Amino acid sequence: MKNKEKNKENISELQYIKGVGPVKAKALSECGINTCYDLIHFFPRDYIDRDLVSNIKALSVRLRQDNLIFQPDDFSSFSLKNETTLIAKIIEKKEHKWGKNKKMLKLKLSDESGYANIIFWNFTDYYNKFYDEGEYVVVSGKPVLDDYGKIIFTHPEIEKFDEEDEKLYRSGGIMPIYRMSQALRNARWTMKSLRNVMANVLESEINKITETLPDYILKHENFPTKKDTIRNLHFPNSHDDIAISKRRMKFEEIFYFQLFLAMRQNKVKVKENGYVMNPKSPRARKLYDSLPFELTNDQKKVIKEIANDFQSGRPMNRLLQGDVGSGKTIVAILNMLVAIDNGCQTAIMAPTEILAEQHFNTIKGLLKDTDLQIVLLLGGQKKKIRANILEDISTGKTNIIIGTHALLETDIEYNKLGFVIIDEQHRFGVAQRANLKK
């Protein structure tokens, strides 16, 4: 994070870069691009490559095959179409008007192998003014076949393809395609102008980028440096450049996210103290021996891991995940008995009263031969019943408290609450879960 802030401090305002200016800089700002650092991290969404660009005839054949394999009625809720890139010439432009101020613009394309149509329903005046017959364009979108078997692109990404672009394309060069918002288009940004500005900014700003991964990771994963990664993503020499650079960026994002979580967890363990508990529990052993079934290896493993956390004296945050009926409840009860034998209260918080009552009845049944007091605390209980429950909790007479959000209310005074189980924890907010810890 410090490197990122340092990079931002050393860059100039975008409007002063050659080819930008105040109007174009404002359009970039609307897209969240305010600095050179932001700009060089505005990576292409795709690439134009001679080996991958389709022609109209091949595209038509592919779409016909798709229509034979996948019937539209079977997949009405989603699209199986992949985005396709074409380079073709505009041979005809027609504007259709109907109703009150309704327009539709159709561009007919040809690449000598066949014909395709582009349909614009919105911003027709802009597209009509900006694109003319005889111009070559790059079209990226999800094509379909109409009722007459003609290829239709509806509001695709479209850019002019000039002689310089064609020369690079014919030589086998790979050209980046950036996501162009309407704000960028209105400010007269084109794919070519954006590529030119990007090239200028990279040349002047790339040396200000510092490495964000240690050398041993770069060597182990065979990653390029951060500078080379950024260059490769904007102006790659090969598909291998793109692949390894994308992999490095994804790795880095996940790596630092995991590092953040580890540091956060370590901060909790270091700065907060928990109860030190002896994992040997007579009550837990008695219940374990009385079970009419054998615990699975996974259940035993989890119980052992929780026991290790009990002994550590550090707060435990553990997610126990399993299918319905997989045995999570018995694992929870056995560990609750460990906490109780160490002089602690325990609690189970459920998202609904029905689920809380189910837990109450289950635990009551399993522990019916013990001297433990188990209470059910719900929001709608009568005042006298609630008062008696709260008194037993505050004096430590109650060993297990089962309830809903009522467990979070401020009038509850727990007596050495040492182990809390939150059922279906995703249905509670972060702040709600933190309140129990307090």
Image (cartoon, rainbow, N blue to C red):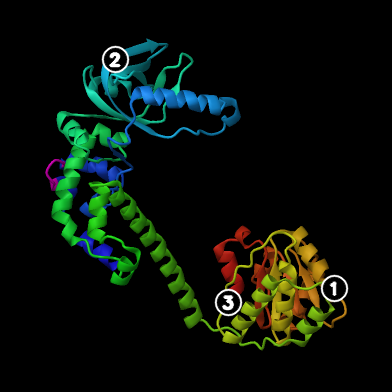
Q: Position of residue 41 (x, y in %)?
A: 28, 52
Whichever of labels 2 and 3 marks the residue nearer the N terminus, that label is: 2
Judge whether residue 34 can be spotted in this image. Answer: no
Q: Indicate left or right for 258 with 233 as reference.
A: right
- Tell me the tag on residue 207: none
- Tell me the tag on residue 93: 2
Q: Which residues are magenta?
A: 16-20
In the image, is residue 343 above or below residue 374? below
Nearest the viewer among 114 and 363 is 114
Three-letter code, disc 3: Met
In the image, is residue 404 above or below residue 177? below
- Image point (78%, 74%), residue name: 389
Neighbour tally class for label 2: few under 14, some 14-19, many 20 plus, Cα within 10 Å: some
**Whole-number angstrom distance, CA of label 2 to CA of label 3:** 68 Å
**Whole-number angstrom distance, CA of label 3 to CA of label 1:** 30 Å
**Is residue 74 highlighted in magenta?**
no
Q: Which residue position is annotated with label 1? A: 292
Label 3 or label 1, whichever lies nearer to me, is: 1
Three-letter code, disc 2: Lys
Whichever of labels 1 and 2 marks the residue nearer the N terminus, that label is: 2
Q: Which residue position is annotated with label 3? A: 316
**Whole-number angstrom distance, CA of label 1 to CA of label 2:** 80 Å
- Image point (16%, 50%), residue name: 201
**What is the secondary structure assignment of the residue under circle 2?**
strand
**What is the secondary structure assignment of the residue under circle 1?**
loop
Q: Report the magenta stretch's main SS.
A: loop
Q: Position of residue 63 (x, y in %)?
A: 45, 25
